Image (cartoon, rainbow, N blue to C red):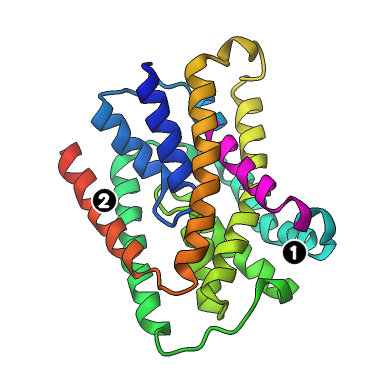
Amino acid sequence: MAWYQAFLLGLIEGITEFLPVSSTAHIILIYHLLGLSSKEVSTFFLVFIQFAAILAVLVKYYHRLRNDGKLLFYLSISFFPFGVLAFAVKQLFESYKDNLFLIIGALFLGGVVMLLVEYLIKNQRLRLSSKKISSKDAFLIGLFQTLALVPGVSRSAAVILGMLFLGYKREEAVEYSFLLALPTITVATIYQLVNEGLFIGIKPLFTPSLILASVTAFFSALVVMRAFLRFVSTRSFTIFGFYRVFIALLLLVLLL
């Protein structure tokens, strides 16, 4: 893999991981544009750069996570439904994870739902704060996150739209989606590495391309998180809804 390919993969992962646009769909798009195949990019490579992006959450929210026991408790509740369902039906979703038309369909439908939710709540005043979240809402948010088991849905989109539906402020929903990514993606990463035996002989897998992609994913994720929070403090998610629809149609055209 050339250095610029590794850089672009890390950049796209870092940018899309926390935006409600499906990082999976964008990685597929980059594969196509760069002329890469899944055989040229190992599972370990993709899993590790995603984990590198998630580490940006730990850096940004370290002090809050360290000092807020209630937050950790509610994040655990929110993670629980996803963890249980992912384990229970892992074989089902594994068989569909590479279904390109399912990913495109989920990307498109997610964009439409996002536009619909924004239309329905445009005259409502979103009042709730994630700092005063209840156990019930934490569990419901976790149920919304399980929708992300379908490839192309986007974990952040599922959490954010679920919280908007419950009446949480946009910036609060975004921030909670960041924080919930930490246990969700960390556990998913460990499981995938163990399940595929990738901890065996792991040292040779740390190539210069992987290191470059991981560093790029980490810093781009850190920048995007800050920019995304500023954006939603004054704007809606409508642009992301239209963007998802556009990317879904673009992928469909490229893959047909």
Q: Amino acid at mark 2?
A: Ile
The residue positioned 36% from the left and 69% from the top of the image is: 113
The residue positioned 65% from the left and 56% from the top of the image is: 179
Examine the rendered structure and indicate whether residue 222 appears above or below residue 36. Answer: below
Any part of residue 96 in sight = no
Q: Residue 71, percent across and down?
A: 76, 63
The crowding category of the residue bearing disc 2, from other C-alpha atoms within 10 Å (few below 14, some 14 to 19, many at least 20), is: some
* Residue 182: mark in rendering: none
The residue positioned 60% from the left and 43% from the top of the image is: 54
Q: Residue 92, percent across and down?
A: 49, 42
Q: Residue 46, percent across and down?
A: 49, 30
The crowding category of the residue bearing disc 1, from other C-alpha atoms within 10 Å (few below 14, some 14 to 19, many at least 20), is: many
Examine the rendered structure and indicate whether residue 140 appears above or below residue 178. Answer: below
Whether the magenta-drawn stretch holds residue 66 is answered as: no
Q: Main secondary structure of the magenta part?
A: helix
Q: In the image shown, does 30 or 56 lie closer to the viewer?
A: 56
For mark 2, give the secondary structure: helix
* Residue 74: mark in rendering: 1
Q: Residue 12, percent across and down?
A: 40, 39
Is residue 59 toward the left or the right of residue 94 in the image?
right
Q: Amino acid at mark 1?
A: Tyr
Name which quarter of the figure residue 175 lies in.
Answer: bottom right
Q: Which residue is mark 2?
A: 247
The residue positioned 71% from the left and 72% from the top of the image is: 131
Kindly report the distance in space between the C-alpha atoms of the residues bearing marks 2 and 1.
Answer: 34 Å
Which residues fall within the magenta stretch?
49-64
Whether the magenta-drawn stretch holds residue 60 is answered as: yes
Quarter that holds the N terminus = top left
